């Protein structure tokens, strides 16, 4: 195992900068997930670590050794691709052992490593089959097995589950978590699926437009989002964001509602009438007879144990959902006053009615509407 460090990493394609001054340290044995929307620079970052993309500026270090300009084969890494990249004319055993055979390893060593990896991944019965005879999940196991047999210092995964159906993705997430617990290898994993990130990661690195927006444990990025982008990106459904102004009486006042300010916010001495954005997760909204938020219910999505209730706030409250990034606070109010609440059980009885909701003050998130930064962070 080895640590992985990225120092001031930059990648440009012509005049377009896709990764901007990126600094990241991954400890030995850590499972770090790069999370972000398509085109944010996360896969390009992974490919620079692998040596498949040239680095424009900065350094890549593995185990303290500068490998920025080293050949991919000299980096002691193994990469698992989105499309599996298996050789169709080789059987499973040959695919898994290809790199070892290319390196001239002894036959007995190769057979032992393939057998061990196949047992770990439960594909011992598939070793004689060709890729076309395998399911998507089985092909992905073979691709992972090919990486395991090399015993690299660092594992790299580029959206390995995105081609699988929802049920199989859930199963493979669990398999990957168990595999990492067993092997303890340093892992850098790219995905746009936040469920994968939240369930697999030791830490999550959230990207937007080639920049890191926040690094933290799954609990940290969910409970303490650093800015409006992270707040709206993490969580399903995403956080409700409302335009408010601070009042001297310890209230956050929007159009047609007021919410009590959290105790931590009052200690900051926020100037009266300051434009803020208050965030509340759908799970933190609760029905209350005198609740300050009046939701005109338009849609109820029944999910069995709970319902997603979607509607518009009465009195035309503005939705502060950001367009993108930390500067998104400038677009704090839009013309779509929508709110989502996650309520227990079947909430169809509230359809087309006005539902009054409340949230505990300490569960509120507050952001500067100009910079997008969290005041608590």
Image (cartoon, rainbow, N blue to C red):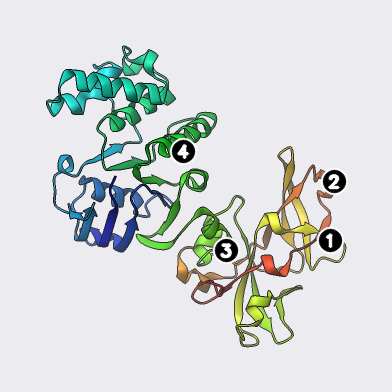
Q: Position of residue 242 (x, y in %)?
A: 64, 68
Mark 4, secondary structure of its residue? helix
First in sequence: mark 3 vs mark 4 = 4
Q: Nearer the viewer, mark 3 or mark 1?
A: 1
Q: Quadrant of residue 295?
A: bottom right
- Which-is-in-front pick, marks 2 and 1? 1
Q: What residue is pinned by disc 4?
A: 177
Q: Are marks 2 and 1 in contact (CB under 8 Å)?
A: no
Query: In 3D space, how far apart are the residues under numbered discs 3 and 1 (Cα atoms)?
Result: 25 Å
* Residue placed most toward the observer, 191 or 114: 114
Q: Earlier in the sequence, mark 3 or mark 1?
A: 1
Q: Give the residue pinned by disc 1.
A: 288
Q: Quadrant of the N terminus?
A: top left
Across and down, in percent, residue 6 comes to 27, 58
Image position of 12 with respect to 190: above or below: below
Circle 2 sits on which residue? 349
Alpha carbons under labels 4 and 2: distance apart: 40 Å
Dot 3: what SS?
loop
Image marks 3 and 4: residues in contact by CB distance under 8 Å: no
Q: Residue at x 43, y 25 (%)?
A: 137
**Numbered badge on residue 329:** none
How many other residues sit within 10 Å of disc 4, few (<14), some (14-19) or many (≥20)?
some
Between label 4 and label 2, give the one nearer the viewer: 4
Q: Quadrant of residue 156?
A: top left
**Which residue appears at 81% of the width and 44% of the height?**
348
Q: CA distance from mark 3 to mark 4?
A: 33 Å
Q: Identify the residue under disc 3.
A: 321
Circle 3 Cα neighbour tier, 10 Å, few/some/many (<14 / 14–19 / ≥20) = many
Q: Mark 1 or mark 4, which is nearer to you?
A: 4
Q: Pick whichever of labels 2 and 1 is earlier in the sequence.
A: 1
Question: Tag 2 or tag 4, which sits nearer the N-term?
Answer: 4
């Amino acid at each position: 195992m080895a640590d992985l460090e990225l120092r001031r990493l930059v990648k440009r394609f012509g005049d377009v900068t896709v990764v901007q001054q990126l600094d990241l340290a991954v400890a030995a044995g850590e499972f770090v997930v790069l999370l972000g929307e398509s085109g944010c620079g996360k896969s390009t970052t992974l490919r620079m670590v692998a040596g498949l993309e040239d680095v424009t500026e900065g350094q890549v270090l593995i185990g303290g050794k500068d490998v920025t300009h080293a050949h991919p084969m000299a980096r002691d890494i193994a990469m698992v691709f989105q499309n599996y990249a298996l050789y169709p004319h080789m059987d499973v055993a040959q695919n898994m052992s290809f790199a070892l055979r290319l390196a001239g390893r002894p036959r007995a060593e190769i057979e032992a490593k393939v057998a061990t990896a196949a047992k770990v991944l439960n594909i011992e019965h598939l070793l004689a089959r060709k890729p076309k005879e395998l399911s998507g999940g089985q092909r992905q196991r073979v691709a992972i097995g090919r990486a395991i047999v090399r015993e690299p210092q660092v594992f790299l995964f580029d959206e390995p589950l995105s081609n699988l159906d929802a049920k199989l993705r859930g199963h493979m997430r669990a398999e990957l978590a168990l595999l990492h617990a067993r092997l303890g290898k340093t892992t850098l994993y790219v995905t746009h699926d936040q469920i994968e990130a939240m369930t697999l990661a030791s830490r999550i690195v959230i990207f937007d437009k080639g920049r890191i927006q926040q690094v933290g444990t799954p609990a940290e990025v969910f409970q303490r989002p650093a800015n409006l982008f992270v707040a709206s990106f993490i969580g399903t459904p995403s956080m409700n964001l409302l335009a408010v102004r601070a009042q001297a009486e310890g209230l956050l006042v929007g159009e047609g509602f007021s919410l009590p300010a959290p105790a931590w916010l009052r200690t900051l001495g926020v100037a009266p009438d300051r434009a803020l954005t208050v965030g509340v997760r759908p799970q933190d909204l609760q029905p209350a007879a005198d609740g300050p938020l009046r939701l005109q219910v338009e849609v109820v999505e029944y999910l069995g144990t709970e319902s997603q209730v979607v509607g518009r706030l009465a009195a035309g409250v503005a939705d502060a959902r950001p367009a993108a990034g930390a500067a998104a606070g400038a677009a704090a109010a839009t013309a779509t006053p929508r709110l989502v609440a996650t309520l227990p059980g079947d909430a169809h009885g509230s359809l087309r009615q006005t539902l009054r909701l409340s949230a505990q003050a300490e569960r509120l998130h507050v952001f500067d509407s100009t910079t997008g930064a969290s005041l608590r962070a």
